[in-house]
Structures are given as C-alpha cells and as structure tokens.
Image (cartoon, grey):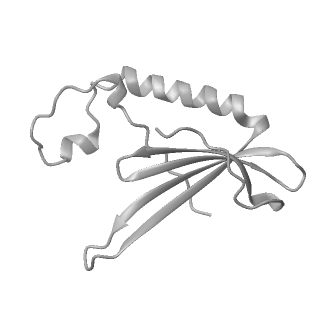
Amino acid sequence: MEEGKKKNIVEGGDKEILYSKAIKAGKRIYYLDVKKNLKEDLFLAITESKKIQSKESSNVTFEKHKIFLYREDFDKFVDGLVDVIGYVKSHKGEVTRSEENAPKKKEAPAETDSDIKLDIKFDAE
C-alpha cells in the first residue's frame, strides 16, 4: 500500500481532494479520496480502477467505478464491511458454485488471511 498523500488537485469547488490513499491490488487500484463539497462538508470518494486489455488489439483502457460515502454513514459502512469480511474469512474453506464449475488449476499454496481480497463492485455513474 502507498502512504496517504495530501493533495489539492483542484482548489475550490466540489472536486477538491484534501487527502488521498491508493491501494494497488493486482490489476486493480483502489483510490480513497477525501473531498470537500461546496458546503464545506467532507466526504469519501472510493474509486476502483481496473486495467482492461482488448483481445483484438493491444489497446489498454481503464474501467472505473465510484461510490461516494458521506460522514453520517461512515460508522454503518465500516460495521457492514467488517461483518462481511469476517464472514468471508470464516467461510473461506467452502466451495462456491462458480468455483465448482471453473476449470481445474494447478494446486496453489494454502491461503492465509492476508491473501483474502475483497472485491467490491459499484455501479458506474
């Protein structure tokens, strides 16, 4: 993970980034940006950026999904996130239907709790 960085990309307006943290995870990068709206309220903008390479050509594009999380919802969001992460960790040995139908891969080393990745998908704006 990269260290959090304070940056003012656009001063004024509702797009000002006060603090940012990038989390690199394979083909994805998650950006956690603290922004300020026109009413001086702070909120969190979470962006998932995924690298997509076209099969027909060598063109590379990035698919982005965003969610905006407001201060009054932080505690509920964190509680829900901790709950689902706990569920995933406690059920990691169970096989899901999609895994049953997937082609067999070579045996990989055993997973540790630090290998579990949470894949959150958000609707595009």
| Residue drawn at point x = 34 percent, y = 76 percent | 59
Q: How many marks?
A: 0
Left/right placement of residue 18 relative to residue 95 reads: right
Would you place residue 7 above or below residue 74 in this image? below
Q: Residue furthest bottom?
A: 57
Left/right placement of residue 74 relative to residue 2 reads: right
Position in image of residue 1 (x %, y %): 46, 38
Left/right placement of residue 21 relative to residue 10 reads: left
Quarter occupied by residue 65? bottom right
Position in image of residue 14 (x %, y %): 80, 59
Decide which of 108, 30 is in the foreground and name it: 30
Decide which of 9, 55 is in the foreground and name it: 9
Position in image of residue 92 (x %, y %): 32, 26
> Could you tell me which quadrant the C terminus lies in?
bottom right
Quarter occupied by residue 53? bottom left
Would you place residue 16 above or below residue 55 in this image? above
Position in image of residue 105 (x %, y %): 12, 43
Decide which of 124, 28 is in the foreground and name it: 28
| Residue drawn at point x = 25 percent, y = 73 percent | 55
Would you place residue 70 above or below residue 114 in this image? below
| Residue drawn at point x = 46 percent, y = 50 percent | 29
Q: Residue furthest right?
A: 39
Quarter occupied by residue 75? top right
| Residue drawn at point x = 45 percent, y = 65 percent | 62
